[in-house]
């Protein structure tokens, strides 16, 4: 996979993913708890620095190499 997620974007994805997964474990009786599992997606894309949607739309937040 080609890297298309830059530095700030990557950090924000990882923080958001961890926050959503933490909320999943901290709210065991919430009826919407399963929705918080969506945090796996930004966490995974942040960790591997590649986003499939960015690839589909031809986007990239990585710095360009000169």
Image: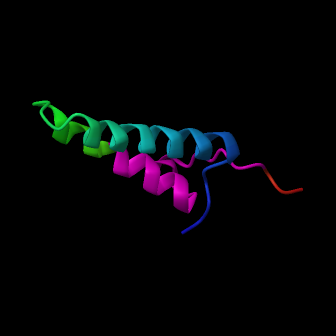
**Left or right: 59 in relation to 23:** right
**Residue shown at the point (52%, 40%) measured from the top left:** 15
Q: Quadrant of the C terminus?
A: bottom right
Outermost residue on the right side: it is: 66
Give the x, y percent position of residue 32: 15, 31
Give the x, y percent position of residue 43: 45, 51
**Left or right: 24 in relation to 51:** left
Relative vertical location of residue 29 with respect to residue 13 in this rendering, above or below: above
Relative vertical location of residue 28 with respect to residue 54 in this rendering, above or below: above
**Residue shown at the point (28%, 37%) measured from the top left:** 26
Task: Report the front residue among 56 and 3.
Answer: 3
Q: Answer with the quarter of the image where residue 31 lies.
A: top left
Reply yes or no: does residue 60 show up in magenta.
yes
Q: Answer with the quarter of the image where residue 25 lies.
A: top left
Task: Report the front residue among 47 and 27.
Answer: 27
Q: Quadrant of the N terminus?
A: bottom right
**Residue shown at the point (61%, 50%) measured from the top left:** 5
Give the x, y percent position of residue 29: 12, 33
The magenta stretch is 39-63
**Left or right: 14 in relation to 30:** right
């Amino acid at each position: 996979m080609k890297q298309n997620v830059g530095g700030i974007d990557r950090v924000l994805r990882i923080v958001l993913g961890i926050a959503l997964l933490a909320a999943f474990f901290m709210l065991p009786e919430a009826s919407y708890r399963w929705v918080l599992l969506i945090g796996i997606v930004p966490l995974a894309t942040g960790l591997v620095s590649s986003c499939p949607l960015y690839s589909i739309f031809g986007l990239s937040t990585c710095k360009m190499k000169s």
